């Protein structure tokens, strides 16, 4: 961080998808490389997402 500059904000990305097998292989690879956390179903996100987000903002 440079003197006098604003503190750097950290961003976290989350992807929720129901059927990763329906995503083309190269797109799935790009998604895996781009996002910080993936959930393979909405139910999984509902069960674990709130805790993950709470840890990220703590």
Image: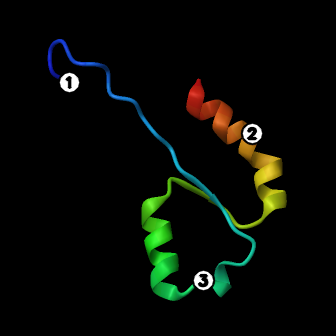
The residue carrying pointer 3 sits among few (fewer than 14), some (14 to 19) or many (20 or more) residues within 10 Å by Cα, namely few
The C terminus lies in quadrant: top right
Residue 7: quadrant of the picture: top left
Q: Gap in Å between the C-alphas at discs 1 and 2?
A: 30 Å
Q: Secondary structure at mark 1?
A: loop
Q: Which mark is residue 23?
A: 3
> Would you say 45 lies left or right of 3 here?
right
Instruction: Return the x and y of residue 30 as percentages of the image width and height.
Output: 43, 73
Q: Gap in Å between the C-alphas at discs 3 and 1?
A: 38 Å
The residue carrying pointer 1 sits among few (fewer than 14), some (14 to 19) or many (20 or more) residues within 10 Å by Cα, namely few
* Residue drawn at x 32%, y 28% as measured from the top left: 8
Mark closest to the chain's N terminus, 1 or 2: 1
Looking at the image, the residue that sits furthest to the top is: 4
Looking at the image, the residue that sits furthest to the front is: 5
Label 3 vs label 2, nearer the camera: 3
Mark closest to the chain's N terminus, 3 or 2: 3
Judging by the rendered image, the residue that carries numbered circle 1 is 1
Mark closest to the chain's N terminus, 3 or 1: 1
Instruction: Return the x and y of residue 22 as percentages of the image width and height.
Output: 66, 86
The residue carrying pointer 2 sits among few (fewer than 14), some (14 to 19) or many (20 or more) residues within 10 Å by Cα, namely few
Residue 38: quadrant of the picture: bottom right
* Residue drawn at x 60%, y 83% as measured from the top left: 23
Q: Secondary structure at mark 2?
A: helix
Judging by the rendered image, the residue that carries numbered circle 2 is 50
Q: Is residue 54 above or below residue 4?
A: below
Q: Is residue 57 above or below residue 53?
A: above
Q: Gap in Å between the C-alphas at discs 3 and 2?
A: 25 Å
């Amino acid at each position: 961080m440079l003197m006098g500059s604003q503190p750097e904000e950290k961003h976290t990305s989350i992807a929720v998808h129901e059927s990763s097998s329906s995503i083309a292989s190269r797109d799935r690879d790009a998604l895996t490389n781009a996002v910080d956390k993936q959930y393979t179903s909405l139910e999984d996100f509902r069960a674990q997402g709130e805790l993950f987000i709470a840890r990220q903002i703590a």
